[in-house]
Amino acid sequence: MKLVIEGVGKTYRGGTAALQDFSLELEAGVMGLLGPNGAGKSTLMRILATITKPTSGRVLWNGEDAVRSPNGLRSVLGYLPQDFGVYPNLTAVEFLEYLAAVKGVPARTVGKRIAELLALVNLTDAARRPLGGYSGGMKQRVGIAQALLNDPRLLIVDEPTVGLDPEERVRFRNLLSDLSGERIVILSTHIVSDVEAAATDIAIIDRGRLVAHASPEELLRSVEGKVWEWVVPSAELPAVKEGWLISGTVRRGDGVHVRTVASASPAASAVSLPGTLEDAYLYGVAQARERAAA
């Protein structure tokens, strides 16, 4: 089981390049795709879900070109888009029955499968209520259930925890981890904590280009000795933000505690701290932008 992305580019009308020469190889596990809003994450997800065709490059699923012959990939695909819509007058069961028929799930197994999935996303008690009365988080959980209907080999989820409360987020992260052993899961998000909790490897994308692809441990090693904290007066904070890559600030009685990622100490009073994945993510994006500018 292998997904290969080879030199994929996507340029929209007007010349806007959403993706540029993007290449990646994935096998079973959870791959976290991290990037700021507008980085090209959703465009890549739509291409992998065979909804959008790339302008250049190709996508191979087990050696087969999924752009030219998409049906092989579609038969084993589960997809939760960022903007997931429902039919408000249908109940969760009716909606999932409809999508199961569209996906070709065998009729003899549909009832059991839907019951399992509704229990998995904690919606059993609301299964017979119209979706129009669901909260945003409940609709998102229905979206997660529909993506799993056909027991997919490739599961793509685009910003899946939007609208979920903290308990639901933890449940979903654990679910992704449980699913990862037997399929490829791509989790696209700008929320570092979601990736940190579930991903076995991480790809960072910025301005349509792949910035880094590594394990969480490798990314953490990239910022060893580069994370600092020092205290500045509130009045100096704007100037500090202009001159340094800031990953966090906390206001306390003695001033603003500023956390930065830099190759050298930013001040004589600065102390070195262990890095986090958020530090590594911000540092990777900043380094890529510096290289592009140069």
Image (tube, grey):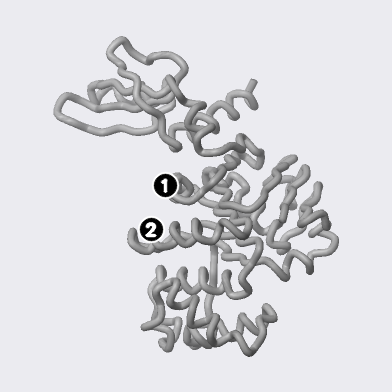
User: For the residue marked with disc 1, what is the amino acid?
Assistant: Ser
- From the viewer's perspective, tell me whether residue 288 is left or right of residue 232: right
Q: Residue at x 57, y 57 (%)?
A: 181
Q: Quadrant of residue 126?
A: bottom left
Marks 2 and 1, the one that precedes in the sequence: 2
Sort mark 1 into few (<14), some (14-19) or many (20+) by Cα contacts within 10 Å: few
Q: Is residue 67 above or below residue 225?
A: below
Q: Which residue is mark 2?
A: 170
In the drawing, what numbered circle is on residue 41?
none
Q: Position of residue 247 (x, y in %)?
A: 39, 32
Give the residue type that dot 2 points to: Val
Q: Crowding at label 2, few (<14), some or many (≥20) Cα neighbours within 10 Å? A: some
For the residues marked 2 and 1, what is the alpha-carbon distance in whole angstroms?
10 Å
Q: Is 22 situated left or right of 211 in this image?
A: right
x, y percentage for residue 118?
Answer: 46, 78
Residue assigned mark 1: 193
Task: Establish if 99 lies above or below 286.
Answer: below
State the residue lying farthest toward the left. Answer: 253
Residue at screen point 52% across, 48% down: 199
Quadrant holding the C terminus: top right
